Image (cartoon, coloured by chain):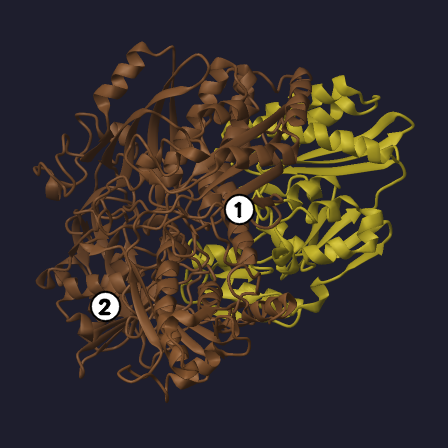
C-alpha cells in the first residue's frame, strides 16, 4: 500500500489545484521578452495616425487633405467619404446602436475620429495628421446627463433624432437611449408607503477609465494574393472580434485570423471594436500592406472605453430594527455620444440588478435610463462584471445611510440583513439565484481580526478631539462568469467558453482555450486544473490562447469569466480524457473498468496492491495499444455552457485618517477577506487581489475623467488621471474563507474583480464615515485632498 | 506623441553652445534635463527648429564652495543635489526640496538650471532660490552677468533670461549659525507639481527671529516671496499667534490658477497651511530639535 507520505509527495509533484506555484509567464515578462502588438515588425508595415476633433460638438464644414497628401511618405488619408462606398463609415455597436467610424458631417465628442493618415512611418504619419485641414462650426455641447434630458438640450445624434427606438426599446427624448426596468414596482412602492423607516440618497459613480499600461492598437495585414486578413490586436475577445470583422467586411470568417499577442492589461478597455481598428483594416485591404495603429495615452484616455458615469438615487425601506423591507433604485446612465457599451446583448444595464447585494431584501425595483452626452462612447466593466461595481456601491452606501439614520452600528446592520448560510441557493428579489455563501462567518472573521470594537472606541475618542477617522465596511456579493447562454449572448453568440486538451504520447500536454490572459496568469492556473484532473505535472502542460486559427471559439476574458467558464471547460475536457484513460487502463490491466479507482496520477485495481497504470503509461498506450474499437490518441474538447453565474463574496474593512487642514486621506489599514470558492493558485489570487484593491484605491481616491462645460477632457494625461504607484498604495492585509460553488466542476468562482468591486465602496464608506457623526451621508468620489477639503471647509472643521 | 521635425545640436563647451544659440536665436531651445521641454514638444505645444543639448558641456556641472558662496552648475541634476554633502551642510533647503521633486527617474535627468530657467511657477527651485537668497549667472555672447533670484521671475514661462543667454550657475549663500529651513509641499501624488508649497529659511538669535524668508510655489504666475509675512516675524519670538498672522498675510498675496489640483480658494488655504508647517519645522530645526 502506498504510504501517506508517498501519496503527498506524488500529489505535490503535480503542482495542481491549491499549489502556490510561481507564474509560468513571469520569466518572459521580467526579462523584457514579452511580445506586445507594438513589438510586431512585419515587413512593409505602414502607420496610421488618427486626426481627431478638438471640439466636443461641431458640424464639419470641410476636410481638406491636399497638404497632407503632398507630404512625401503619406500614402492615404481616409475620411468618412472614403468609407461610405464600403458602408463602413458607421458601424453597429453591441448595444443595437451605430457608431461613427470616421465622423460623418458632425463630431459628437472631443477627440472623435475624423480621419486617418497612413504613411510610410509613424513620424511622417504624425506630420501628415497635422496637415489635414478640418473646418468646424462649433455647436453647444452637453456633458451632464441630467441636462441632456432637458427639453431644449442640444440634439447630439442628428442621425437618429426622429427615431423612436435606438436598439434597446422606446426612447422618450432626442438624447434618451433606453429605459430598462426590473423588479416589482407596485409591490416595492407599497412597502415604501407603509414602512417604519425610509432613507433616500443620491450618489454618483464618476466617469473613469481602465487605463491599462499598454494602450489599444493593432496591426492589420491583408494578403491580396490569398485574400486573407490577419489582425494582431490587443483584444480581450479575439474570436468575437473575428466574427465582427467578418460581418463588417464580408470576408469569410475562415479567411480572417485574429491574434491577441501578450496584452499589457485590459480591465475592460480592450473588449470593444474601435474606429482605429476598422480604419487600419480598411487601409490594409486597400494598400495591401500591413497597417499599424497604436493609440497614444491621450487617445486611450479620451476615446476608447470609459467606465461608470452612473448617477444613482437609492432608497431603502426598513423596520425600526433596521431589517430592510424594500429597495428602490433610479439611475441615469451616461453612455456618451454613441451607445457602444460592452455588455451581454440583452442587458442594457449589465448585471446591475445584483444591487440587492448580500442582503435578504423581500422586494425591489430598479429603473435605468440611458442618455447620450457629448462625451466619448462606451461604458465597459472596468475590472468588474458588467455594472456590478455600480450595484455594490449603491447598496453598500445605502445600508450605511440606513445605519446612520437608525443609529445602529454599521457592522451590526449588515449582520441583521445578511442572507443566511442555510438560505442558499437563494433567489433574490430581482431574480438572481445566488449559488452559495456564508456572509456572517466572513464578516465576523474580519471584525475579530481587526478588533472592531477597539477601532470604534478609538474613533469616538478622536471625534471628541476634532480628529477625523473613518471606518469603512463593504460586505459585497459579485456575480461573475457570464454566462448561461439562455441569459447571455453577444450578437447572438452564447457566452459559453471552451478548452481543447491534447495529451502527447510522453504525457506532456498542450491545451488551448477560448479565453485570453492579460495578466491573469492563465498559463499557470489552467495548467494546474489539468494537472489535478489528469495526474500529469503542470510543469509539462503548455497553455495557448489568443490565436483564432488554433484556439477553439470562446467569448474571451472579462467579467471574471475565465475561471468560472473557461476553467470549467478545462476541467470538463480533462474529465473526458480521464474517462478514456480509464478505459485504456482497464484494457492494459485486463480488468473491468469498475474495478479501477483513481489515485492522484494513476488508476489502481481496487484491493490489489501494485496493479496500477500511471497516466504517463496510459498516455503512451493511447498511441499504440488501445481497446478494440477505440480511436487512438488522447484528446478532448469541451464547450462549457455554465448552468448559472458564480457569486464570489467578501468582507472588507478600511480605516482612514484624514488631515483636517489639507483634506489628505491616509489609508491606515485595509483588511480584505475574499471567498472565491476553490482556490486554484493562492499566490496568483493574492496578486489579483492586490491589483484589484490598488485599482479600487485609484478609483475611490483619485480617478475621474473630468470635463469642462464645453466638453473638453481636462484629465487627459497621467499627470491629471491618477494611476497610483507603490508610493501611494496602502498596505493590503488579506484573508479568506472557502465556500465552493456547487455547480462549478471544481467549485471555483472567479476572483480578479472582487477586490475592485468591493474595494471602492469600502474606501468610499470609510471616508464618509469620518464625517458621519456630523450628518454627512455621501461625498462624491474621487476623494482627492481637494474634494475632501471642500467638505471639511464647509463644515468649518479646519478653523484654527 | 511625436514632435515636429527639429535639428539637434550637441555642443561640447559653453562657448560653442552660446554661438549656436546666437545663430539660431528664436528658433532654438536649450535642452537640459528635458522633463518640461520634451513633453511640450511631443504634444507639439512647442516646436523649436533647433535643439541645443547642454548635456555634454562639462563646465556646467558640479557643486563647489567659493568665498562663503555655494556655486552650483546649471546642469547639475536633482539627484546630484540630493547626494551633495556640501549642500546638506551649507544649503540644506536645496536637497530637501529636490527630494520632493517628481520621482527618482526624473531626478536622474532633471536639472536645477532647467527647472529655474523654464519659468514655470509649478517648478520648485524658483521658490527655493528666493528663500535661500540665491543669484543666477546668465552667460551670453557679451559675457556673463549675475542677477538676484528676487526679481528674476517675471511671469509664467517668462524670466529675465534673454534669448541669447544661458543660465550657467546658481549661487547660494551658505547658511549661518542658528539657521532653520523647511520645504513643505502638498501634492496629489508622486511626480506631481505642488498644489501649493512653502519654502522657509530663518535664523534665530536665541529665541528671536533674526531673519526669515518665506517663498511660495505654484500659487501665482511666478514663485512668490512673502515679504509682509516675513516682516511680521522678523525681530520677534515666533509663537502660534504670529505664525497664524503670517499665514493670513501669505493668503493675501496668492493669485493661483484653478485647475484639477484645486480652485483658487483651496490653493490659497493650502499655501497658508504649508507656510504654517514650514515655519514650525524650520523653527524646530533652528533650535536644533
In this rendering, the answer to whether A477 lies above or below A501 is above
Q: Quadrant of the C terminus of chain A?
A: top right
Which residue position holds label 1? Answer: A694
Circles 2 and 1 on the same subunit? yes
Q: Colour of chain A?
A: brown
Q: Colour of chain B?
A: yellow
As rendered, which of A164 and B154 lies closer to the eye?
A: A164
Question: Residue B8 at x, y = what percent?
Answer: 51, 70
In this rendering, the answer to whether A252 lies above or below A555 is below
Q: Is residue B140 visible?
A: yes
Which residue position holds label 2? Answer: A281
Question: Residue A389 at x, y = what percent?
Answer: 40, 39
- Quarter of the image where one finds residue B245: top right
**Looking at the image, which residue is at 22% across and 45% down?**
A338
- Quarter of the image where one finds residue A436: top left
**Looking at the image, which residue is at 77% across and 29% down?**
B280
Disc 2 is placed on an element classified as helix
Q: Quadrant of the N terminus of chain A?
A: bottom right
**Looking at the image, which residue is at 20% across and 61% down?**
A244
Question: Residue B123 at x, y = what percent?
Answer: 60, 45
Q: Is residue A132 visible?
A: no
Question: Do labels 2 and 1 touch, CB within 8 Å?
Answer: no
- Tell which subunit mark 2 falls on: A
Mark 1 neighbour class, 10 Å CA radius: few under 14, some 14 to 19, many 20 or more: many
Mark 2 neighbour class, 10 Å CA radius: few under 14, some 14 to 19, many 20 or more: many
Disc 1 is placed on an element classified as helix
Q: CA distance from mark 2 to mark 1?
A: 36 Å
Amino acid at each position: 500500500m502506498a504510504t501517506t507520505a508517498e501519496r503527498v509527495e506524488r500529489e505535490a509533484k503535480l503542482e495542481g489545484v491549491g499549489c502556490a506555484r510561481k507564474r509560468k509567464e513571469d520569466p518572459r515578462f521580467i526579462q523584457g521578452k514579452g511580445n506586445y502588438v507594438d513589438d510586431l515588425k512585419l515587413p512593409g508595415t505602414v502607420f496610421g495616425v488618427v486626426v481627431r476633433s478638438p471640439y466636443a460638438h461641431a458640424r464639419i464644414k470641410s476636410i481638406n487633405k491636399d497638404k497632407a497628401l503632398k507630404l512625401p511618405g503619406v500614402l492615404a488619408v481616409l475620411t468618412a467619404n472614403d468609407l461610405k462606398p464600403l458602408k463602413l463609415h458607421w458601424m453597429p455597436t453591441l448595444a443595437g446602436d451605430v457608431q461613427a467610424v470616421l465622423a460623418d458631417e458632425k463630431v459628437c465628442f472631443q477627440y472623435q475620429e475624423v480621419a486617418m493618415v497612413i504613411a510610410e512611418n509613424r513620424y511622417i504619419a504624425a506630420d501628415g495628421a497635422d496637415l489635414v485641414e478640418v473646418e468646424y462650426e462649433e455647436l453647444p455641447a452637453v456633458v451632464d446627463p441630467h441636462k441632456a434630458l432637458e427639453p431644449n438640450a442640444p440634439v447630439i445624434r442628428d442621425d437618429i433624432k426622429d427615431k423612436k427606438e435606438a436598439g434597446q426599446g422606446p426612447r422618450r427624448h432626442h438624447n434618451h437611449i433606453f429605459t430598462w426596468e426590473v423588479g416589482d414596482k407596485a409591490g416595492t412602492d407599497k412597502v415604501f408607503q407603509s414602512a417604519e423607516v425610509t432613507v433616500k440618497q443620491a450618489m454618483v459613480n464618476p466617469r473613469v477609465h481602465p487605463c491599462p499600461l499598454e494602450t489599444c492598437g493593432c496591426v492589420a495585414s491583408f494578403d491580396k494574393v490569398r485574400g486573407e486578413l490577419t489582425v494582431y490586436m490587443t483584444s480581450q475577445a479575439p474570436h468575437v472580434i473575428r466574427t465582427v470583422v467578418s460581418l463588417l467586411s464580408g470576408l469569410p470568417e475562415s479567411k480572417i485570423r485574429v491574434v491577441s499577442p501578450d496584452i499589457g492589461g485590459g480591465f475592460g478597455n480592450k473588449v470593444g471594436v474601435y474606429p482605429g481598428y476598422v480604419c487600419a483594416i480598411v487601409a490594409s485591404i486597400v494598400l495591401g500592406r500591413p497597417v499599424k495603429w497604436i493609440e497614444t495615452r491621450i487617445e486611450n484616455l479620451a476615446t476608447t472605453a470609459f467606465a461608470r458615469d452612473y448617477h444613482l438615487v437609492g432608497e431603502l425601506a426598513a423596520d425600526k430594527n433596521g431589517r430592510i423591507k424594500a429597495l428602490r433604485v433610479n439611475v441615469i446612465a451616461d453612455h456618451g455620444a454613441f451607445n457602444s457599451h460592452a455588455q451581454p446583448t440583452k442587458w442594457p444595464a449589465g448585471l446591475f440588478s445584483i444591487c440587492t447585494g448580500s442582503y435578504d431584501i423581500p422586494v425591489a425595483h430598479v429603473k435605468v435610463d440611458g442618455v447620450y452626452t457629448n462625451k466619448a462612447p462606451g461604458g465597459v466593466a472596468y475590472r468588474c462584471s458588467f455594472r456590478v461595481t455600480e450595484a455594490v456601491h449603491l447598496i453598500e452606501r445605502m445600508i450605511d445611510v440606513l445605519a446612520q439614520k437608525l443609529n445602529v452600528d454599521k457592522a451590526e446592520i449588515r449582520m441583521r440583513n445578511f442572507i443566511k448560510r442555510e438560505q442558499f441557493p437563494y433567489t433574490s428579489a430581482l431574480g438572481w439565484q445566488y449559488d452559495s455563501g456564508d456572509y456572517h462567518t466572513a464578516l465576523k472573521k474580519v471584525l475579530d481580526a481587526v478588533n472592531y470594537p477597539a477601532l470604534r472606541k478609538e474613533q469616538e475618542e478622536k471625534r471628541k478631539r476634532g480628529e477625523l477617522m473613518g471606518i469603512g465596511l463593504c460586505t459585497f456579493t459579485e456575480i461573475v462568469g457570464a454566462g448561461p447562454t439562455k441569459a447571455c449572448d453577444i450578437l447572438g453568440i452564447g457566452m459559453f467558453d471552451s478548452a481543447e486538451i491534447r495529451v502527447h504520447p510522453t504525457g506532456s500536454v498542450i491545451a488551448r482555450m477560448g479565453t485570453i490572459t492579460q495578466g491573469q496568469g492563465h498559463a499557470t492556473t489552467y495548467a494546474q486544473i489539468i494537472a489535478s484532473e489528469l495526474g500529469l505535472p503542470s510543469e509539462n502542460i503548455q497553455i495557448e490562447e489568443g490565436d483564432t486559427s488554433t484556439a477553439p471559439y470562446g467569448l474571451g476574458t472579462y467579467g471574471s469569466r475565465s475561471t468560472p467558464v473557461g476553467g470549467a471547460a478545462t476541467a470538463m475536457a480533462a474529465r473526458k480524457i480521464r474517462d478514456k484513460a480509464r478505459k485504456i487502463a482497464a484494457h492494459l490491466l485486463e480488468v473491468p473498468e469498475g474495478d479501477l479507482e483513481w489515485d492522484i496520477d494513476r488508476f489502481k485495481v481496487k484491493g490489489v496492491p501494485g496493479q496500477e497504470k500511471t497516466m504517463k503509461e496510459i498516455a503512451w498506450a493511447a498511441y499504440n495499444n488501445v481497446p478494440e474499437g477505440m480511436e487512438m490518441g488522447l484528446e478532448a474538447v469541451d464547450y462549457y455552457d455554465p448552468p448559472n453565474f458564480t457569486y464570489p463574496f467578501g468582507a472588507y474593512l478600511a480605516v482612514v485618517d484624514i488631515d483636517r487642514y489639507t483634506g489628505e486621506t491616509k489609508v491606515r489599514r485595509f483588511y480584505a477577506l475574499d471567498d472565491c470558492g476553490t482556490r486554484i493558485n493562492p499566490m496568483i489570487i493574492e496578486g489579483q487581489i492586490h491589483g484589484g484593491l490598488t485599482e479600487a484605491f485609484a478609483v475611490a481616491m483619485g480617478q475621474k475623467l473630468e470635463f469642462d462645460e464645453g466638453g473638453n477632457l481636462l484629465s487627459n494625461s497621467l499627470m491629471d488621471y491618477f494611476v497610483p504607484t507603490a508610493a501611494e498604495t496602502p498596505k493590503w492585509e488579506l484573508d479568506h474563507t472557502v465556500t465552493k460553488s456547487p455547480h462549478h466542476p471544481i467549485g471555483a468562482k472567479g476572483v480578479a474583480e472582487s477586490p475592485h468591486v468591493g474595494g471602492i465602496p469600502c474606501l468610499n464608506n470609510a471616508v464618509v464615515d469620518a464625517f458621519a457623526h456630523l450628518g454627512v451621508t455621501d461625498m462624491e468620489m474621487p476623494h482627492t485632498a481637494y474634494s475632501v477639503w471642500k467638505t471639511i471647509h464647509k463644515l468649518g472643521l479646519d478653523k484654527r | 506623441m511625436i514632435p515636429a521635425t527639429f535639428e539637434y545640436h550637441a555642443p561640447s563647451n559653453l562657448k560653442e553652445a552660446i554661438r549656436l544659440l546666437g545663430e539660431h536665436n528664436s528658433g532654438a531651445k536649450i535642452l537640459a534635463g528635458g522633463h518640461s521641454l520634451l513633453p511640450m514638444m511631443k504634444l507639439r505645444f512647442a516646436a523649436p527648429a533647433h535643439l541645443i543639448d547642454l548635456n555634454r558641456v562639462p563646465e556646467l556641472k558640479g557643486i563647489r564652495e567659493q568665498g562663503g558662496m555655494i556655486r552650483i552648475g546649471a546642469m547639475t541634476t536633482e539627484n546630484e543635489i540630493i547626494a551633495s554633502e556640501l549642500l546638506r551642510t551649507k544649503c540644506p533647503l536645496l536637497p530637501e526640496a529636490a527630494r520632493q521633486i517628481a520621482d527618482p527617474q526624473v531626478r536622474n535627468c532633471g536639472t536645477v538650471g532647467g527647472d529655474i530657467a523654464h519659468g514655470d511657477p509649478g517648478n520648485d527651485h524658483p521658490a527655493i532660490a528666493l528663500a535661500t537668497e540665491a543669484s543666477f549667472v546668465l552667460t551670453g555672447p557679451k559675457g556673463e552677468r549675475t542677477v538676484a533670484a528676487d526679481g528674476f521671475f517675471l511671469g509664467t514661462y517668462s524670466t529675465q533670461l534673454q534669448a541669447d543667454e544661458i543660465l550657467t550657475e546658481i549661487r547660494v549663500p551658505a547658511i549661518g549659525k542658528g539657521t532653520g529651513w523647511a520645504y513643505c509641499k502638498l501634492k496629489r501624488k508622486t511626480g506631481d507639481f505642488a498644489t501649493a508649497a512653502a519654502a522657509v529659511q530663518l535664523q534665530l538669535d536665541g529665541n528671536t527671529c533674526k531673519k526669515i524668508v518665506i517663498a511660495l510655489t505654484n500659487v501665482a504666475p511666478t514663485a512668490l516671496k512673502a515679504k509682509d509675512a516675513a516682516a511680521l516675524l522678523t525681530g520677534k519670538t515666533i509663537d502660534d499667534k504670529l505664525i497664524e498672522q503670517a499665514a493670513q498675510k501669505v493668503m493675501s498675496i496668492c493669485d493661483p490658477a484653478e485647475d484639477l489640483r484645486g480652485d483658487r480658494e483651496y490653493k490659497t488655504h493650502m499655501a497658508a497651511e504649508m507656510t504654517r508647517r514650514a515655519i514650525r519645522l524650520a523653527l524646530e530645526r533652528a533650535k536644533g530639535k
